[in-house]
Image (cartoon, grey):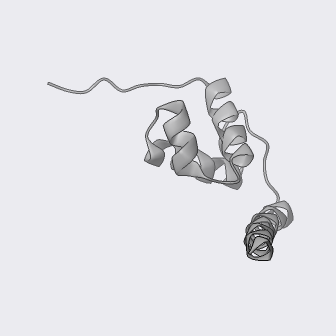
Amino acid sequence: MSKKHKTYTTEFKAEAIKLIEANQGNVSETARQLSISMQTLSNWNTKAKAGTLAGTKQYSPDLNALLEENKKLKQQLKIAEMEREF
């Protein structure tokens, strides 16, 4: 018996990518929220960053680098704020 292949709309994929960004790049948490496979969502995210996923904006290499830097800086800020509380 074969498994049915689930298909998702372009709009759903685009919203999933936006949700990843809202979750600060956390693909596993976003996949849990949407009840879809983490691998599927990761594939969409990779394609979106490469600009090959329909319905999503194309990232320029410069923008992608800035987004990664922003993510790292937010993590560092969070750690610094936690250390300051103690």
Asked where in the image residue 76 lies, by quadrant, the reply is bottom right
From the viewer's perspective, tell me whether residue 14 is left or right of residue 62: left
The residue sitting at 52% across, 41% down in the picture is 31
- Name the quarter where the C terminus is drawn: bottom right
Residue 73 shown left or right of residue 42 in the figure: right
Q: Position of residue 6 (x, y in %)?
A: 41, 25
Instruction: Count how many numbered circles sit on residues in the image.
Output: 0
Residue depicted at 53% across the width and 25% down the height: 8
Please state the horizontal and vertical placement of residue 84, each as a whole percent of the image.
80, 75
32, above or below 10, in the image: below
Look at 82% across and 65% down and name the residue there: 70
- Give the x, y percent position of residue 40: 47, 42
Please name whichever residue, 24 or 68, is drawn nearer the observer in this view of the structure: 24
In the image, residue 79 sits, relative to residue 20, either above or below, namely below
Q: What quarter of the picture does the N terminus occupy?
A: top left
Work out whether 26 lies above or below 18.
below
For residue 75, which quarter of the picture?
A: bottom right
| Residue 67 x, y percent position in the rendering | 80, 61
Q: In the figure, 18 relative to 6: above or below?
A: below
In this view, the residue in front, 70 or 14, is: 70
Residue situated in front as seen by the camera: 23 or 10: 23
- Front residue of 20 and 2: 20
**Outermost residue to the front:** 86
Question: Residue 37 occupies which quadrant of the picture?
Answer: top left
